[in-house]
Amino acid sequence: MNYQSPISPGRSWYEDTAGPRPEYPALDGDRTCDVVIVGGGFTGLSAAAHLAKAGANVVLIEAHRFGDGASGRNGGQLGTGQRAWAEELEAEYGFARAKALFDLAEEAKAHLLEFAAVNNIEIDYMPGQMSVAHKQRYVDDYKAHAEIMANRFNYPHMTFMDAGETAERLGSAAYFGGTRDTGTGHIHPLKLVIGTAMVAAEAGAQLFEQTPSTGISSSGGKVRVTTPKGTITAEKCLIGVNAYGGTLEPVSAAHIMPIGSFIGATVPLGTDSKVLPGGEAVDDSRFVVRYFRKTRDGRLLFGGREIYAVNDPKDIHIHIRRQISELYPELKDVEITHGWGGYVGITVPRKPFVREVMPNVISAGGYSGHGVMLSNFFGKLYAETIAGNRDRLKLIEDLKIPPFPGGRRFRTPLLFLALNWFALRDRI
Ligand SMILES: Cc1cc2nc3c(=O)[nH]c(=O)nc-3n(C[C@H](O)[C@H](O)[C@H](O)COP(=O)(O)OP(=O)(O)OC[C@H]3O[C@@H](n4cnc5c(N)ncnc54)[C@H](O)[C@@H]3O)c2cc1C
């Protein structure tokens, strides 16, 4: 059985700059608890911290080390709202639900920053995010979006940028316009992972690394999670394995598909560099999205999804440098010090997946590249659910998420074809 999650390729710049990263023991022996959590990314660790603080007896197991999935290796961009624009959600669900989903995401953003501040976790927050059009035909969409955000969703922090302002703020003439959002920003994600684990441990959660779950079952009102050296018996279970779950739990696996995304970090660019002088993060309108940002020490962290397999971290350096030079020709020979990848968990409609997959077992994931703030908040919402209030998690549970066509066997070739098509569309 393929329960063991793959390890992501390449050593990240985050690992070299996160500071001390405490190791947690592997589980050896049986345990009984109120809640067992499988997966030590943002979803699982945040749930563990909130549950333990509320007095629950919690056991969390992670197959590798905390943050070795997407949470310690991502682009660090918080974004605003859900992955789907609020107006798209309104078209599908009506204004009241779209607004509720938008407000939930705003709360998620505030929660992340507040959680870090209250618990003295230094996450290197830098404000500002821009979303930019790589084709002229998308510019009007961004313009309309900024207006809708301000006038309909009461979000005052987003403004439209014309081509001139976009070029100035990016230090690149490669884009045609976009939006600038001063109400969000970007972080060092691994620092948040490490800090959240420490908060959970201090609150009394029992945390285990190098402990893969080999199976999850639910019967007679009890959940049993097996591992190589012990079984955990609990009242409730949260599955937070997202894109890394393999075949551990079939319903989640049918709805959440892993796709690779890769990031390269350059050397510090120096104070005279014209790249992103305001320090904002950026994502673009490509379906195979490019996302990049400056770090506090002046590096460019540049990410992109790739449709081909990357076997060697050095391949990441080559692909990322090529993409960087398309936007910043002056960086065509820039030294890339780190190249790494990870798996993003996507769903068919690019909305998060939360479902009770068997009695007393809830699975959460599929944040579709928008999980930094949402996954942390869903951990809190799960804790709320255990405390007896499921209303807010229900907002997400009620979203329509169909399984991927083709089953686990054929969906990857289908996705490959689809990504090829979208990559072609991005270019024309
Ligand atoms: C390269 C990259 C860039 C990204 N950029 C952004 C971004 O800029 N903004 C944004 O909002 N989102 C981004 N994302 C997505 C974001 O990182 C995720 O949505 C979020 O981290 C999901 O957290 P999680 O805890 O649900 O999953 P993960 O962090 O993936 O954690 C799941 C954990 O479960 C463990 N696991 C799996 N199977 C088992 C098992 N059988 N037993 C025990 N443990 C198991 C894994 O080892 C893993 O640690 C990016 C993702 C990647 C990969």
Image (cartoon, rainbow, N blue to C red):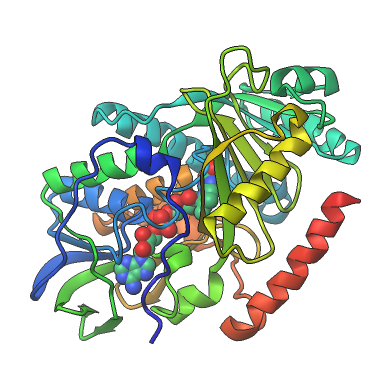
Image quadrant of ligand 1 equals bottom left
Q: Is residue 181 left or right of residue 161?
A: left
Measuring from the top left, give residue 235's x and y in whole percent: 19, 71
Q: Is residue 149 above or below residue 338?
A: above
Residue drawn at point x = 53 percent, y = 28 percent: 299
Q: Is residue 81 above or below residue 39?
A: above
Measuring from the top left, give residue 177's x and y in whole percent: 81, 28
Q: Is residue 255 left or right of residue 14?
A: right
Residue drawn at point x = 10 percent, y = 50 percent: 204
Measuring from the top left, give residue 73's x and y in whole percent: 45, 48
Q: Is residue 270 above or below residue 371?
A: above
> Can you see residue 101?
no
The image quarter containing residue 123 is top left
- Location of the N terminus by quadrant is bottom left
Q: Is residue 370 above or below residue 421?
A: above
Q: Is residue 76 left or right of residue 317?
A: left
